[in-house]
Structures are given as structure tokens and as C-alpha cells.
Image: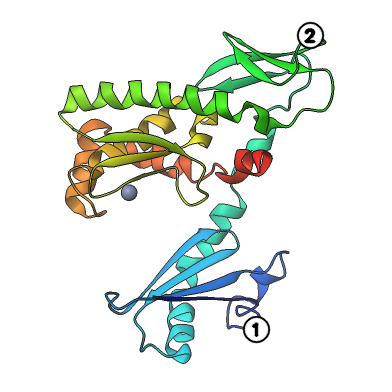
Amino acid sequence: MAQETLKGIFEGMPGFTALESQGRDIDLTIDRSLWQQGISVEVYTAHEVLIKTDSKTSMEEIIAFLVQHKRFILNRIRLYQDRRNTEDTIPLLANGDVVKLFGKPYTVERREDVRWARMSDNKILVPLGATRFGELNGDIRRLSYRELKAMTDAYADLYGFSYSSIHINERRTAWGDCDSHKRIGFNVSLAFLPEPLVEYVVVHELAHTREMNHGRNFWLEVRRVLSDYEERREELKRYNLDWYLDRIA
Ligand SMILES: [Zn+2]
């Protein structure tokens, strides 16, 4: 229904002051909907907190709720601040750089006879002039579709899941998603993650073809396939979903 984003609201809020001084402000988005009951809080990034609630909850109640859940919110924000910066692990497109996509190394080759950046076998061919990462996105999307579909099919066959379709997206909200029609979406940024984390995202979305929510039965489905999913899930939080998307925007 209605969504509003408030800036600077954590300034001066009991317990949150130290955090604000660490640089960028933390925005609070309040999402009100008819079907929401009570209040819940989610932390999206180091600077985005989301409150979901119904249309009647007052601002005082929301602030009281935030203060009450201060510990959870602060821990989440620190986790994101501490997140591994993928910038260190993904090189730019200089001659000889190695870019790993789905664990496979591609060597960047700058060449006079190349007009625009493209992928070929184990190379990324780049023109001599300035190149934007985005020129490669079509190729990276195609590669992502191939790799993710193969992995999804393998797990689906082995563990008896079924889905209706797979698509690749550039949304900034999630590594993967699955709707009630069992259509699975995968983020193109998965190409840059280590394989165990890609596997976790694939299995997570396949589990949603049986259990739409994140309830107990959902996690049982995930655990049935990946007994160490909790470690993978924690590790995934350290990766920055926006790194690649920022470079192709
Ligand atoms: Zn999920």
C-alpha cells in the first residue's frame, strides 16, 4: 500500500547515535499494507532498514519497536559494513587481468582488432580504448543462464524438485527469487560468487518451489540438499550484490 522513506531518523535515537557517526545516514523505509499484522523489521544493507506494518501503527510505536530491537538492527548493520568487498576480488578490464565467472578464469586481452568487449572461450576480448564493464553484460547474462540452468536442473533431478522457468535479472534486492508459479529468477551478479554460494542460492530457490515462506519446512528442504547451508548462508551475507550492478548501470 503506502511506502515512505525517512532520512536521518536514527539520529539521536537512543543507542543508534554511534552508528550514524560512521558515515552515511541510515534510511528507514516504512511499508504499510493491509495484510501485514503487527510490526516487523528487516535490514537490507548497511544503510537501509525496512519496517513492515499495518496502516494504523503510529510513529511512536514504530520508534519504540526500533529501540526495542536495537541489538538485532545494529548487528545486521555491522555485518553489512563488514561485508567482504568484492572490489578486491574482481579485477577491472586491464590487459592480463583474470576475471573469474562461475569459478572459471577468463583472461582479459586488450586488442586493436576488437571493437567492443566480448567473451570468447577462456578470454575476455577488450578494445584498446576505454571499456565499460556493461558491454560484457549480454555475454555474462547468457553465461549465467547456461550455468545456472545446468546447476538448477542437476539439483532438481537429484532431489525431485520441479520449476517452470528460469530468468536472469539485474534487481538490487536479492540473489534469487521464486514466485508462486515456480518461476525462478537469478541475479546476474551470481556469476562472480564462489561456487558453494551459487549452489546455496540455487537450492534455496528450488526449495521455494515446495515451500513459499521461510518457515521450518522450508529450511528442512534446504538442509536435505545442503547440510552445511547455514555456513553458506552466513558467508553469502559478506558479498556485495551491488558491486557488479553498479558497474553496468
Ligand atoms: Zn527465500
Q: Is residue 211 above or below residue 147?
A: below
> Can you tell me whether the CB of the residue at mark 1 lies under 8 Å from the nearest atom of ligand 1?
no
Residue 194 place in picture, x, y as percent: 49, 27
Look at label 1 and name its amino acid: Gly
Residue that appears at 37% across and 30% down:
199
Residue that appears at 47% across and 78% down:
66
Q: Is residue 228 visible?
A: no
Q: Which residue is mark 1?
A: 12
Q: Is residue 144 above or below residue 75?
A: above
Residue 231 place in picture, x, y as percent: 39, 39
Q: Is residue 137 above or below residue 122?
A: below
Mark linked to residue 172: none
Q: Which residue is mark 2?
A: 113
Residue 120 place in picture, x, y as percent: 60, 11
Element marked by disc 2: loop
Residue 43 place in picture, x, y as percent: 48, 62
Which mark is first along the chain, 2 or 1? 1
> Can you tell me whether the CB of the residue at mark 2 lies under 8 Å from the nearest atom of ligand 1?
no
Q: In terms of depth relative to the viewer, which is nearer, 14 or 37?
A: 37
Where, by quadrant of the figure, is residue 177 drawn?
top left
Look at label 2 and name its amino acid: Asp
- For the residues marked 1 and 2, what is the alpha-carbon distance in whole angstroms? 59 Å
Say which quadrant the C terminus sits in.
top right
Between disc 1 and disc 2, the foreground one is: 2
Where, by quadrant of the figure, is residue 107 drawn?
top right
Residue that appears at 21% across and 42% down:
209
Q: Is residue 184 visible?
A: yes
